[in-house]
Amino acid sequence: MNNKLNTRAVILSALLCSIGIIIPMFSPIKIILEPASFTLASHVPIFIAMFISPGTALFVAFGTTLGFLLGGFPITVVLRALSHVVFVSIGSFYLKKNKEVIKNMKSSMLYSFFIALIHAISEVLIVIPFYLGSSLSAGYYDKGFIVSILGLVGVGTLIHSMLDFTLSVYIWNLLPKEVVKKSMIKA
């Protein structure tokens, strides 16, 4: 039984990880606000992994980071993906102890906001040294620090994260009951 459970967890983690790699590479739904861009649903596999377990969530976060690295994305994008480990760790361990949080709209949205805030702060902290080191594209400097870093990266990530979280809960609720039942959290 335990062997079957471990096999299921590995397969589910690998599937979510591969979806997390494929979405940013091939998604036609990208919002481009020069110099930043946001790919709708790119965090969905990570959020669904958070609903399952901290181990699954961390595996998917590291796996998607590796996908960005191997996919030839700029180092700032790779490191922003790596920063997901921060919100994934906090969020998935919280969900493990508070499974009911995604069961109703109010607690789910409040949780989404705080996780998105951690997500946004982490990504801003990754980008600041590149900005100060004049390592980013000219578009960042044309718009200035407030608009480019705090606005596009910070507020943009906050909104993007909350949209993807909402989409993730919706998808989670559409999953077959036997998949949800055998996972840690039922929404």
Image: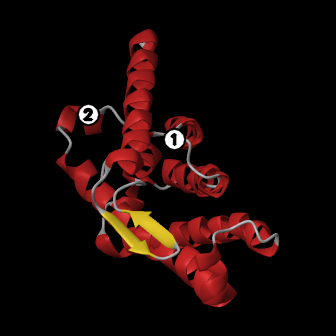
Number of numbered discs overlaid on the protein picture: 2
In the image, residue 168 above or below residue 178: below
- Quarter of the picture holding the N terminus: top left
Q: Amino acid at mark 1?
A: Thr
Q: Position of residue 68 (x, y in %)?
A: 54, 43
Q: Which residue is mark 2?
A: 179
75 left or right of 117 in image = right
In the image, residue 50 above or below residue 34: above
Q: Amino acid at mark 2?
A: Val
50 left or right of 143 in image = left
Q: Of the residues tagged 2 and 1, which is closer to the observer?
A: 1
Q: Position of residue 3 (x, y in %)?
A: 45, 10
Q: Nearer the viewer, residue 164 or 174?
A: 164
Q: Which residue is mark 1?
A: 64
Q: Secondary structure at mark 2?
A: helix
Q: Secondary structure at mark 1?
A: helix
Q: Position of residue 187 (x, y in %)?
A: 30, 53
Identify the mark at residue 106; answer none if there is no mark. Answer: none
